[in-house]
Amino acid sequence: MVEGDILKIIAGAVITEPGNTAQTETGSWRNFRPVIDEAKCTGCGMCWMFCPEPAISKGKPARVDYRYCKGCGICANECPFKAITMVPEGRD
Amino acid sequence: MKQVLTGNEAAAIAAKLARVKVISAYPITPQTAIVEKLAEFVANGELDAEFMKVESEHSAMSACIGAAAVGARAFTATSSQGLMLMSEMLYIAAGLRLPIVMANANRALSAPLNIWCDQQDSMAVRDSGWVQLYCEDNQEILDSILQAYRVAEELMLPVMVCFDGYILSHTAEPVDVPEQEEVDDFLPPYRPRHPLDPAMPVTMGPVGVPEYYQEIRYMLHEAVRAARDKIVEVDREYGKRFGRRYGLVECYRSDDAEIILLTLGSLSGTAKDLIDRSRKRGERVGLVRVRAYRPFPREVLVKALEHAKVVAVLEKDISLGWAGALFADVSCALANVEGAPLLMNFICGLGGRDVSPLQIREALRAAARAAEVGEVKRPVRWLGLREKLVGLGI
């Protein structure tokens, strides 16, 4: 149950309002960061479709929401234009 | 109406009076007669409930969890190995805050295989978040199961009603069985707060990530603690309606006692006889029986015990390599209490070994000696041990 912007836990951790997964920012789990080459991106939406989170928004170019991206690399693997590179976190 | 009932029959009749909607169980000695009787009630139309036959106790508890989640009043019964097989699901029932009531006919654990009474089984799951009540006689079994549903449903906690296998489960005693209408007035239908219902979807059993898990466990702990007051409140109302009250602990001739026996379950009856005999000789001895073991009734116990010189804890379980569970808990309760009594632990009655008046007398004598010298040299002792049979090192 959300009161203000605080999630109040219901007994037994029952979730009565959907969508609260968004409160768990899984971006901190990431070891590799997907970086989109805007010049190569055609906006086909393949990365958006395959992202399991979903942490990618469709568009030209596609955008990664790094608050949630776990760095699984599926987007980079699926991109038909090789427009996404996985860069180790902590390196520029 | 008074009927002559075994403990198992009293438990089955209580579940029927509670109008349980789902019973799921797997047979195990000495509990089996409870669910056999309930199956009979369902088959002959006396009880409108779903009787779910399952392939194991793990499944029985799982079915009760599902039933309670959709808002049905659920009941099961087990013993010993069955309780152990259920243990994974016991933690889940409590964690999901589902008000399941279970009867546990206390029985020893294997190995060696043993079908007779001790309390090792329910002690092994004392930390699961279930409320645990221990009964002294068959009347208390019936009354406790009815009370258990009120406590369970008002706090959203599962409750285990424990009673000694064979000594109570298979022994017939007169039991006052209340009328259905009286029970209906006391125990209204179960109204779950957040049932699984397609019309109002909820998620049950989500992942508790590190940011939330600790708070969820704290809430469960606080709910079990709150059961102390709830048990007393429900018991008081039950007493007004049905004329019988039990409380968290029972104090028997203990107000001015220098030596107090601390017990659980049916053993208390024999021990009370011994107390009466000792009192006739002018010995200041008494007994305190723990009925609500989880939550642990610290405040009332400290009040009941603190004036004594020696408290002798008699129990049918042991945390191997250490001491009995009740002894450890009462030691913890008396920590930081100024002038707390000396504590002694007597392990007895394991695997159906009869706890004779002679053994209890031996414990009383040892406690009297400790009171005299003011110290306890061997805090944990075994009663009725046939030492010549023991082949240590063989």
Image: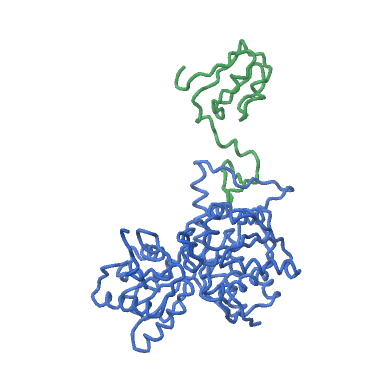
Chain colours: A green, B blue
> Quadrant location of residue B332?
bottom left
Residue at left offset 70%, top offset 46%: B201
| Residue A36 vertical placement versus B204 (above, below) | above
| Residue B382 vertical placement versus B240 (above, below) | above
Q: Nearer the viewer, residue B76 or B388?
A: B388
Name of the residue lying farthest toward the left: B373
Image check: B289 left or right of A14? left
Residue at left offset 54%, top offset 52%: B88
| Residue B336 vertical placement versus B59 (above, below) | below
Percent of width and height locating residue B180: 70, 74
Q: Nearer the viewer, residue B63 or B388?
A: B388
Name of the residue lying farthest toward the right: B45
Image check: B217 left or right of B286? right
* Quadrant holding the N terminus of chain B: bottom right
Residue at left offset 54%, top offset 74%: B168
Percent of width and height locating residue B394: 32, 59
Percent of width and height locating residue B337: 33, 66
Q: Nearer the viewer, residue B387 or B140?
A: B387
Residue at left offset 74%, top offset 65%: B48
| Residue B123 vertical placement versus A22 (above, below) | below
Name of the residue lying farthest toward the top: A39
Q: How many marks?
A: 0
Image check: B349 left or right of B95? left
